[in-house]
Image (cartoon, helix red, strand yellow):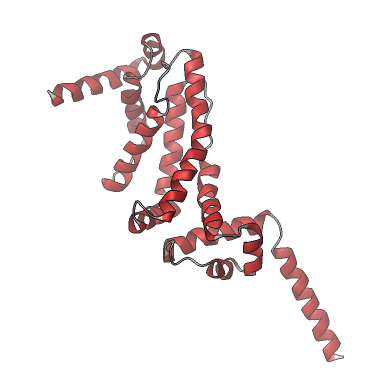
Amino acid sequence: MKAATAKRTARRGASKKRALVRGEPVVRGVLAATLEELASAGYRALRIEDVATRAGVNKTTVYRRWPTKEDLVRAALLSITDEKIVPPNTGSLREDLIALGRAIVEIQRSPEGQSLFHVFLSEGPDSELMAIARSLRETQEHGLRAIIESAVARGELAPSADPMLPCELLAAYLKNRLFAHRAGVDDAQLARVVDVILFGALQPEGRAEAGGRGAAEGAHAAEGAHAAAR
């Protein structure tokens, strides 16, 4: 009798375990565990077995969906940006860039963003992890190009051989501000930076539309920087 009861209990336990390893909650759990393991162990020392243990699933569950460590880490990193960086479509390039900037700040200020930044530094620029990050940037660029293409179609932005430059300048400024200088970025500062970036990129008629007071602030800032350089 006791043996039969034990078998039924074991079957129920196995059934519950099977339920836990299916569906979107498990995917989110494994990707979150991957980010945590990456932050604590680094890319080179990361093992799928350790990720599975942290996520509370069998390692075969992880291998079935992500056959290699590279696949798993790429999916984990993408899960951060996919949720928080959705290409905006406000009808204005200036407002699109401000919205994009807010999303970047949110990611870089998050515990995951802070931890991963230090991991990237320790791994070095030529590491496999950096190669994964570069491939993700190429994937994200397709979505961000929509911002630029819409601005060109509206006549706000002049066609360029380097269309992603406004987005890249914004991202570089925010990275430097948040990590190198350990300084905050509020909405007013974000708007000023976007105005300075756009002052040299907008069509003449687009400058008047984009700006009013905001574009004037950007113009004064750009002129001041030019005067200081002289």
**Residue drawn at point x = 74 percent, y = 67 percent:** 18
Residue located farthest toward the right when viewing the structure as drawn: 1
98 relative to 206, above or below: below
From the viewer's perspective, tell me whether residue 182 is left or right of residue 67: left
Residue located farthest toward the left when viewing the structure as drawn: 230
Quarter occupied by the C terminus: top left
**Residue drawn at point x = 46 percent, y = 61 percent:** 38
- x and y percentages locating residue 168 in the rendered image: 38, 33
Depth order, front residue of 57/63: 63
Depth order, front residue of 138/207: 138
- x and y percentages locating residue 126 in the rendered image: 36, 52
Quadrant in the picture for residue 206: top left
**Residue drawn at point x = 65 percent, y = 57 percent:** 65
- x and y percentages locating residue 86 in the rendered image: 54, 36
Residue located farthest toward the top when viewing the structure as drawn: 205
Quadrant in the picture for residue 203: top left
Q: Is residue 57 visible?
A: no
